[in-house]
Image: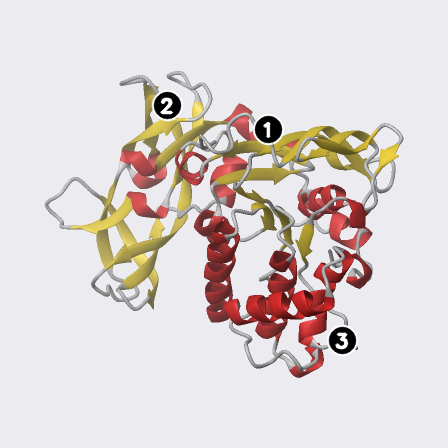
Amino acid sequence: MTELTAGRAPAVVLRGVAKSYDGKRDAIAEMSLEVGHGEFVVLLGPSGSGKSTIVRAIAGIERIDRGSIEIFGRQVAGDRLHVAPEDRGVSMVFQDYALWPHMTVLDNVAFALKRAKVGSRDRKEKASEMLARVGLGGKEGRYPGELSGGEQQRVALARALVGHSGLVLFDEPLSNLDADLREKLRLEIATLTRETNASVIYITHDQAEAFALADKIGVLAGGRLIQMGEPEDIYQRPVNPFIARFTGLAGELAGKVLANPAPGLVEVEVPSASAVLRARMVGRLEPGDMATVALRPFALAISDADEPSIEARVLDVAFRGRGYEHALALGGNVISSVFCAERHPRGSKVSISVDPAGCLAFSEAEEVAVAAVHDPAADGAEDEAIAFDLTEYAL
C-alpha cells in the first residue's frame, strides 16, 4: 500500500463468502480476500475452482449465500443485502466480450458514460479518446460483427476503462484469442489499468498470464483460496504440491529423505535417478519419510560430463528460437522443458545438473491433503452452472 492510499478503505473486501449452485458443493467456500487501491490481483485456478463465481459475485451478477462483500468501504452484499450490478460502480470485461451487436463501437463504449449521466457531447469525445488509446481510432462507426475477436476485446476494454469506476473485473478476457494477440492485449491491459490507477481483479487459468500481470496472485482450488502472495512467493514458496504443479514443473521424482542438512532443506535419495538431491522442504519432512521432489524447469541444465551430474536420455527436442527445449527420460520418469542453447539429438545420452533452488520436496501427507481439496472430477461444473447471456450485465 502506498502513502497515497494509506488509511483509505480497500477496493474490495470479501469476508467468509460462500456460494453453492446445487446446495451440495460450494463453488465458493468461506472465502476471504482483500484488494487494495491500485492493486492488480490475479485469481489463478483450473476450471471449476470458483474464479468466475467470485468475480460475478463481486459484480452483483451472482447472489452469495453467506458472508459479505464491500467495495471501497461500502457493503454491497451480505445478510439479506444485494446491491444491483448497475449500482455497484464497477466495470467488467467478459471472456465473450458482451458487446451489443446493434450498436456501433463508439456507442458501445459511450454507453458506460450514458449510465453515469455524462452529456452526449462529452460521452462521444471521451469514448473516441479511449478507443484511440486501445488502437481503434477511426473504427468508431463500425459494428462488433465487423471486427476481429481481438478488436472486439479492445472495445470491451475501452468500455470498462472509460467510466473510471476505480474497480475493473476481468473474466478470462484473453482465452478466446490466439497466442500472439493475447500477448499484445495482455500488455495493453497492464498498461492502461495502471495508467488509470484502477484496482483490478483478473481471473485466468493461464499461469504465464498470471505471473506477467499480477501485483498479487491468489491460487484457487475447490472454491477455496489456497495461497495468496506476490508472484515470486507463489512460484518460489508454494504451500502444497497442487500449487507447485499448477505453476509449472519439469517433472517429479520419488524418493526417501536421508537428512536435514540445513534449516528448510532436505536430502532425498532418488533410486530411479541413482542420485541424492538436495531440495527445499514444503511442510515437515524427517529422515526416513517418503517424499516427492518437484523440479522447476530452471533447476535443470544439460551439463559438461565432468560436472556433478545425472545421466539421462533425450526423448524429444523442440526449437524455441533462443535455443532448444529437451524432454528427457530419467530412469522411469519423464522430465520436460530442459533448456539448452545447443540441440541434443533424440536418443542421445546427456548429463544434467540439478539446482537445489528449483527443487521442492513434499511429503505423502501433503499429497493426501491436496487431494481432499481439489477434486478434478468437479472441473467444469462451475462454468456449466453459470453459462448464460452476459450482454445485459456489461458494466
Residue appearing at x 49%, y 68% in the figure: 179
Amino acid type at circle 3 is Met
- Residue underneath mark 3: 103
- At a point 59% along the width and 49% down the height, the residue shown is 202
Image spot of residue 254 (x, y percent): 42, 35
| Mark 2 burial class by Cα count in 10 Å: few <14, some 14-19, many 20+ | many
Foreground: disc 3 or disc 2? 3
Q: Is residue 143 left or right of residue 148?
A: right
Q: Secondary structure at mark 1?
A: helix
Q: Is residue 106 left or right of residue 189?
A: right
Q: Which residue is mark 2?
A: 257
Q: Earlier in the sequence, mark 3 or mark 1?
A: 3
Q: Are marks 3 and 1 in contact (CB under 8 Å)?
A: no
Q: Amino acid at mark 2?
A: Val
Q: Position of residue 53 (x, y in %)?
A: 73, 45
Distance, label 3 to label 1, CA atoms, is: 53 Å
Can you tell which mark lies on residue 368? 1
Measure the C-alpha gap from mark 1 to mark 2: 18 Å
